[in-house]
Image (tube, rainbow, N blue to C red):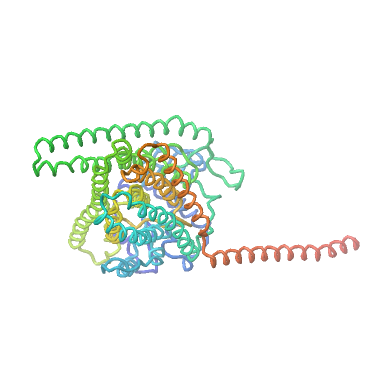
Amino acid sequence: MKVTLSALNTSESSFTPLVVIELAQDVKEETKEWLKNRIIAKKEDGDNNDDFLTMAECQFIIKHELENLRAKDEKMIPGYPQAKLYPGKSLLRRLLTSGIVIQVFPLHDNEALKKLEDSWYTRFALKYQPIDRIRGYFGETIALYFGFLEYFTFALIPMAVIGLPYYLFVWEDYDKYVIFASFNLIWSTVILEVWKRGCANMTYRWGTLLMKRKFEEPRPGFHGVLGINPITGKEEPLYPSYKRQLRIYLVSLPFVCLCLYFSLYVMMIYFDLEVWALGLHENSGSEWTSVLLYVPSIIYAIVIEIMNRLYRYAAEFLTSWENHRLESAYQNHLILKVLVFNFLNCFASLFYIAFVLKDMKLLRQSLATLLITSQILNQIVESLLPYWLQRKHGVRVKRKMQALKTDSDATLYEQVILEKEMGTYLGTFDDYLELFLQFGYVSLFSCVYPLAAAFAVLNNFTEVNSDALKMCRVFKRPFSEPSASIGVWQLAFETMSVISVVTNCALIGMSPQVNAIFPESKADLILIVVAVEHALLALKFILAFAIPDKPRHIQVKLARLEFESLEALKQQQMKLVTENLKEEPKESGKEKAT
């Protein structure tokens, strides 16, 4: 990208650059002029609310407008006859895929970022995060993630405190784990319901609690024949839903099933390695072979992480190819694909060990190895490695700027050059997925490895700071996105808590102490375990129903807001009726005069 300092010199006016559009080096002038005119034409249709909106909100509006630039009567991009266009095609998407536009990203506000860092992570201390400041700078979606991460970390502390003495003093006494498992089941329900209330408090304060997604704009990647939406009356691409369903059921579904089969095949190879390592240790009995017992689990944990990441790319491609109209529909289908695979890939071996092999010692070993290895790998791949690479790049940029001799102010130029080479933050998907899998490790097999919660707490305390560093210094500033909740992830966590009820009840029913109570009649044992499991599930749903999703004061404020809206509508209607009644005598008088 060729950038001149004169083009970036903003000292003459109060202009604040918000978003950078990086073009390829050899883009033709007519293409630049055409793109500039389309953007300016879009801008003139809107209002100027710069003083009313935050910088993050302005950047979100710019992104929204750029993504909704669509071809009308153009057949190609000017200067590039090979870049074909058709009515309704997203111009930005075509420019990106054609290599004319390299990337579009918002700039950091260095002064505001420094203030946020000082109150967030630069001083390591056990304190609450500045969620409102995070929301003001990064938007509601990222603020909700950090709010959930903080809440989930503190919610894990009771489990860690109770689980530690169980691990130290009653390791083999499975009958004593009944109390701990029961507490786990109630805990997993209560924390998710209480989070809904806290989330409602935050989003009401931010003004996004009642955000409607029903008339959401089509996502940038959505394509089809340009037509009129019969509901909104707006011009937008139209695509038959039956074609999308055919792609889902004839291509995506078989591919996901094939990946699940491959995951199970890799799992069986892992068990063959476990048998080999155990046989080697039994034959030699040396200290070296005792360490070797952990090697298959470590290798399997690394393979799981690699498979999860490769599958994620395939799932994104397939979901994009399905051509969903709304971003929310795209995200829901993507999350469903990824969650099904990740759940099987991460937990299938644990279920196999617990209910087929019935080897509790191997289950504890595998669970501990998978949990700790995945946490270490995530910290390295997501934070430490990108931070180290970014530091090296920053040093190179500063050396270039020092070698550049100019009288102009090169601060903005340096910022653009530095930030354009930063990695792109791909959203909160991977961060929520990490917490979801962690929740599974803690809740599914709590009565076998109660120390899992303690490891999760230690990881999350460092995760808060590493994720904050990642957002502020490693990645480009992401575009803000308004959100009313954590979305489909709430349902994912609730589903995991239901599965944990079944798992823990089955593990307790398999324990030697419980089996000793029913030495002859296994049918009675199964019936009692199923009855207890149903009773606990009923208790979960009663608790979920008894705890309101929104606090009482929020419900009152929302009801008052709805009442005031209806009253205002009534007054407006009465005003129109009165004006019409006043107009009728005048019109009749004119008729008599004529």
Asked if residue 211 is positioned above or below residue 444 in the image, the reply reads below
Tell how many labels. Answer: 0
Asked if residue 219 is positioned above or below residue 593 in the image, the reply reads above
167 sits to left or right of 487: left
User: Which residue appears at 84% of the width and 65% of the height?
Assistant: 586
Say which quarter of the image contains residue 523: top left
**Is residue 71 in view?**
yes
User: Which residue appears at 52% of the width and 55% of the height?
Assistant: 545
Image coordinates of residue 466 in percent, x first then y, are: 27, 59
Which quadrant does the C terminus fall into? Answer: bottom right
- Name the one closer to the observer, 186 or 410: 186
Say which quarter of the image contains residue 226: top right
Image coordinates of residue 376 in percent, x first then y, are: 23, 51
**Is residue 470 in view?**
no
Image coordinates of residue 577 in percent, x first then y, are: 77, 63
Asked if residue 37 is positioned above or below residue 275 in the image, the reply reads below
Image coordinates of residue 294 in percent, x first then y, are: 18, 43
User: Which residue appears at 47% of the width and 68% of the height?
Assistant: 51
- Name the one closer to the observer, 481 or 356: 356
Asked if residue 17 is positioned above or below residue 533 in the image, the reply reads below
